[in-house]
Image (spheres, rainbow, N blue to C red):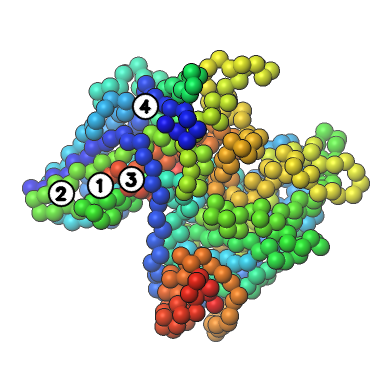
């Protein structure tokens, strides 16, 4: 449950993993041969690839979440859904409902962002490790983790940012201020300027992100932050588009 | 045989990124400093002191003044993270390629401290570049910077102002003469500090992965007020023949104040000097830094001035830094 009492349930959470690489310095020693689309509504950890035969040593890990023309679809991803993503140039597509006190809102938001996540580091055996360390005869399972709650943070910079939905629900309004239809569109989000959100609903600070002026851009910016490493581990975010 | 496998998972969780406080050693350098407007050429002809903002107002600025307490330079990636080969200056200044240094909400990862200019200043630079005091640093790749506002100075007769703009806005035959002023309290970040972090360090006309500072030189700070006024609707400003301040609770002023927190308005670059190096000197700065900065700062100072780290730390218990 979010800080403002809303709960969100996804019915689709499609993510395109592209450019997954294991690096020795700046040179890739292993890479996904083909982008992979995953539906995270399907429970559990999904295997992406296995790279046997690496020399022992430390390797960097990076990956991208970006739109692609061709991909391997893991179980749970409909070909028709991927066709929709491809047509719209989306790398991420989330569909779901949010509920609070008998009110339900639905949403279907696609994002054409292309975000590269580099210099990933995460906790391994109680220590924060950059990338991965392959030991002699050993195996390291790397988890590329997607944080599904990030779309709903109420600040782009505040470490104490909370997940909320009320500001998004309020974007659903009909013509001339009439009641909304229960479906929150990205066009409706883009129509809400951050400067017009009353202070009592939150600051919706943008930190240094000067270009973020409306809720549509705010959520799109947050969509770039879903990619993580080994659970809570972090990667540097680079924007490719 | 070794094997390396990859998997993915969906989790719902939150954490906060930590900052690195390591210090990279390098050769000491003196860094002259100046501040100027980001030129019109950098914003597709819409920048400088005259531009068309997103609300359709043609704005001409007569005064652009800021009060600064410090400039700090770091090795960490800026909030603007470019990754395609040649983003234009317009893209940079319009923030089209902004990113976060780390994925969770939180302050950006500044990395190593590489330099600073700690002499407070106020500067009005609508008509041209203004020289600031010299700063110091060590050689290395400067990737990002922090601008700290100073609320103790007077801009255009307004005590405590940190930013002051004056100009004319015209749209559909309507003209507004305006001033826009912000105080230190209005420009604080999420940690309640009057600063803008994660500003970009980029080579002139270029991009990408920071600037190699190799010797004494000049740090150029270019400020883009077009970004502060980008979505300001001057309809909120009072009509009249004398400039008036944007009304306190107006949407126009709220937009202006929000925009002051954007990193894209502060662009840093470096120009290598051909002049002979000057001696570094130490002097007391009555400056307070957050206590979490004292240790890395002292490591930096110790290397810079070839002093012992403990001598610095002894002075700074509680966060006071000389």
Per the image, the residue denoted by label 1 is: A22
Please state the chain letter of the residue tagged with numbered disc 1 in the rendered image.
A
Per the image, the residue denoted by label 3 is: A232
Tell me whether marks 1 and 3 sit on the same chain: yes
Give the structural element (helix, strand or loop) at label 4. strand
Disc assigned to residue A54: 2
Q: CA distance from mark 2 to mark 4?
A: 32 Å
Q: CA distance from mark 1 to mark 3?
A: 19 Å
Q: Residue at left 67%, top 58%?
A: B184
Q: Of callouts 1 and 2, which one flags the residue occurring earlier in the amino acid sequence?
A: 1
Indicate left or right for A212 with B227 as reference.
left
- Above or below — where is B11 with respect to B47? above
Residue B304 visible from this viewpoint:
no
Which label lies toward us, 4 or 1?
4
Q: CA distance from mark 3 to mark 4?
A: 19 Å
Where is residue B110? Give x, y as percent. Answer: 46, 59
Give the structural element (helix, strand or loop) at label 3. loop
Q: CA distance from mark 2 to mark 3?
A: 26 Å
Which label lies toward us, 2 or 4?
4
Q: CA distance from mark 1 to mark 2?
A: 10 Å
Indicate left or right for A85 with B197 as reference.
left
Per the image, the residue denoted by label 4 is: A13
């Amino acid at each position: 449950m979010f800080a403002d009492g809303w709960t969100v349930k996804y019915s689709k959470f499609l993510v395109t993993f592209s450019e997954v690489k294991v690096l020795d310095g700046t040179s890739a020693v292993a890479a996904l041969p083909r982008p992979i689309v995953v539906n995270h509504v399907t429970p559990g950890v999904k295997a992406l690839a296995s790279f046997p035969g690496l020399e022992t040593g430390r390797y960097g890990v990076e990956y991208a979440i970006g739109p692609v023309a061709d991909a391997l679809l893991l179980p749970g991803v409909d070909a028709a859904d991927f066709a929709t993503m491809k047509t719209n140039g989306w790398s991420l597509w989330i569909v779901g409902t949010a509920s609070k006190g008998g009110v339900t809102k639905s949403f279907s938001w696609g994002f054409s962002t292309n975000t590269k996540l580099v210099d990933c580091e995460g906790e391994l055996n109680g220590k924060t490790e950059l990338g991965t360390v392959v030991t002699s005869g050993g195996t390291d399972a790397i988890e590329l983790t997607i944080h599904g709650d990030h779309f709903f943070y109420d600040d782009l910079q505040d470490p104490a940012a909370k997940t909320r939905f009320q500001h998004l629900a309020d974007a659903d309004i009909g013509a001339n201020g009439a009641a909304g239809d229960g479906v929150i569109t990205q066009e409706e989000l883009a129509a809400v300027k951050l400067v017009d959100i009353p202070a009592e609903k939150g600051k919706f600070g943008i930190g240094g992100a000067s270009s973020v002026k409306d809720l549509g851009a705010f959520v799109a910016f947050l969509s770039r932050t879903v990619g993580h490493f080994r659970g809570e581990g972090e990667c540097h975010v680079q924007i490719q588009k | 045989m070794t094997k390396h496998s990859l998997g993915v998972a969906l989790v719902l969780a939150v954490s906060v990124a930590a900052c690195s406080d390591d210090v990279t050693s390098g050769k000491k350098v003196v860094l002259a400093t100046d501040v100027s407007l980001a030129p019109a050429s950098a914003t597709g002809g819409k920048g400088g002191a005259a531009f068309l903002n997103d609300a359709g107002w043609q704005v001409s600025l007569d005064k652009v003044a800021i009060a600064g307490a410090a400039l700090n330079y770091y090795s960490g990636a800026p909030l603007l993270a470019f990754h395609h080969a040649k983003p234009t200056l317009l893209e940079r200044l319009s923030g089209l390629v902004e990113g976060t240094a780390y994925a969770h909400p939180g302050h950006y990862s500044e990395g190593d401290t590489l330099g600073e200019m700690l002499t407070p200043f106020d500067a009005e630079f609508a008509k041209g570049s203004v020289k600031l005091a010299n700063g110091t640093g060590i050689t290395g790749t400067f990737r990002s910077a922090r601008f700290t506002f100073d609320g103790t100075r007077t801009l255009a007769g307004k005590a405590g102002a940190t930013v002051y703009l004056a100009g004319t806005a015209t749209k559909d035959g309507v003209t507004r003469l305006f001033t826009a002023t912000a105080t230190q309290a209005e420009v604080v970040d999420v940690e309640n500090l009057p600063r803008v972090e994660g500003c970009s360090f980029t080579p002139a006309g270029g991009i990408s992965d920071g600037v190699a500072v190799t010797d004494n030189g000049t740090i150029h700070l270019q400020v883009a007020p077009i970004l502060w006024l980008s979505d300001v609707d001057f309809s909120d400003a009072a009509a009249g023949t004398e400039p008036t301040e944007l009304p306190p609770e107006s949407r126009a002023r709220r937009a202006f104040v929000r925009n002051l927190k954007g990193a894209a308005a502060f662009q840093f670059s470096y120009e290598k000097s051909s002049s002979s190096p000057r001696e570094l000197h130490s002097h007391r700065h009555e400056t307070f830094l957050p206590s979490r900065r004292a240790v890395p700062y002292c490591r930096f100072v110790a290397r810079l001035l070839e002093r012992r780290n403990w001598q610095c730390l002894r002075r700074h218990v509680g966060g006071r830094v000389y």
